[in-house]
């Protein structure tokens, strides 16, 4: 009877502890209105067009150009970058490539996805994809792990035939993320996300005629802001495990302690 009660209490506490984690909204990007998405791409890291996750950015360019976009990615997210290249009616076979760089401009390897594809001479479009590794809240200085901050997407044609240099192309880029949660949590966090300065501001000091100039950080960030890096649902399951261990100990003691002094033992004088 006591073991049944202990088991029922364990199941009830497990459900109550897991409910907050399941009820909270997922920080993964959801499709948003593309009305504010950029319709032009940058030509370098410094001029990369900023897009939010879930937006579909478009841009027209020429074969042979380097096209750049930037987007924010936070700890616990696994970004997926997809790009579509619309080719003219007449062209030679073309190979296109998509590369993703982190805030330190280190190229991040794709876990899977077609990051290089060759379009046949009669193809009207081709699609590229790159699934990055899960963004970590902290990493060793020597490691090449993806960290929270700004990421850059570069789309370009490689080994382009001379006859196709400068032909007009249309491009579409979209970034989505999957929330990995506590499975990717680490014991540590960055002091600040890897968001570069992209401009210089000027403002007058109080009581002085001189101007104070300082770097302006990129305004792009996740919709809910950057995470603190210390909280994850791993804490919930750690607490659940501690409660279950305590209940198991209490149940084991209740089952093994017996009903008291055995009847065959004579009372002491």
Image (cartoon, helix red, strand yellow):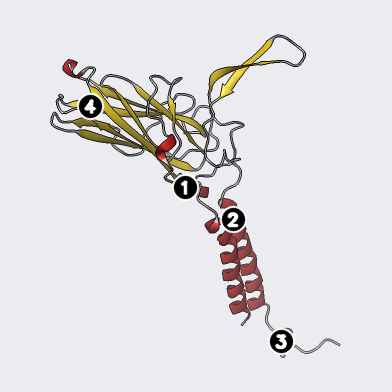
From the viewer's perspective, is the residue at label 2 or at label 3 nearer?
2
Callout 2: SS: helix
Q: Decide: marks 1, 3 in contact (CB < 8 A)?
A: no
Q: Position of residue 50 (x, y in %)?
A: 45, 29
**What residue is disc 1 on?**
180
How many angstroms separate mark 4 from mark 2 (CA)? Answer: 48 Å
Q: Residue at x 28, y 29 (%)?
A: 170
Of labels 4 and 2, earlier in sequence is: 4
Which mark identifies residue 236?
2
Q: Quadrant of residue 168?
A: top left
* Residue 262: mark: 3
Labelled pair 2, 3 in contact (Cβ < 8 Å): no
Q: Is residue 216 above or below residue 34?
A: above
Q: Residues within 10 Å of mark 4 (few under 14, many from 20)?
A: some
Q: Which residue is mark 4?
A: 95
Mark 4 or 1, closer to the camera: 4
- Distance CA(mark 1)–CA(mark 3): 56 Å
Residue shown at the point (23%, 34%) measured from the top left: 126
- Classify mark 2: residues with Cα within 10 Å, few (<14), some (14-19) or many (20+): some
Marks 1/2: CA–CA distance: 15 Å
Res. 55 visible in picture: no
Which of marks 2 and 1 precedes in the sequence?
1
- Which of the numbered marks, if any, corresponds to residue 122? none
Q: Residue at x 33, y 39 (%)?
A: 112
Residue 176 x %, y %? 41, 41
């Amino acid at each position: 009877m006591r073991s049944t009660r202990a088991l029922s209490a364990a199941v009830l506490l497990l459900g109550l502890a897991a409910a907050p984690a399941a009820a909270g909204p997922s920080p993964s990007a959801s499709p948003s209105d593309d009305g504010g998405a950029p319709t032009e791409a940058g030509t370098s890291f410094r001029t990369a067009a900023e897009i939010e996750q879930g937006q579909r950015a478009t841009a027209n360019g020429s074969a042979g150009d380097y096209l750049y976009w930037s987007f924010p990615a936070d700890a616990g997210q696994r970004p997926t970058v997809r790009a579509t290249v619309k080719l003219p009616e007449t062209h030679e076979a073309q190979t296109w490539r998509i590369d993703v760089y982190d805030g330190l401009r280190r190229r991040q390897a794709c876990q899977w996805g077609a990051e290089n594809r060759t379009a046949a001479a009669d193809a009207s479009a081709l699609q590229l994809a790159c699934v990055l590794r899960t963004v970590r809240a902290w990493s060793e200085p020597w490691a090449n792990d993806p960290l929270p901050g700004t990421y850059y997407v570069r789309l370009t044609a490689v080994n382009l035939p001379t006859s196709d240099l400068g032909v007009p192309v249309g491009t579409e880029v979209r970034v989505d993320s999957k929330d990995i949660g506590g499975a990717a949590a680490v014991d540590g966090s960055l002091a600040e996300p890897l968001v570069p300065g992209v401009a210089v501001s000027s403002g007058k000091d109080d009581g002085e005629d001189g101007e104070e100039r300082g770097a302006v950080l990129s305004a792009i960030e996740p919709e809910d802001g950057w995470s603190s890096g210390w909280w994850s649902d791993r804490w919930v399951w750690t607490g659940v495990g501690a409660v279950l261990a305590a209940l198991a100990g209490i149940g084991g003691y209740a089952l093994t302690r017996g009903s008291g002094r055995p009847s065959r033992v004579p009372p002491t004088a």
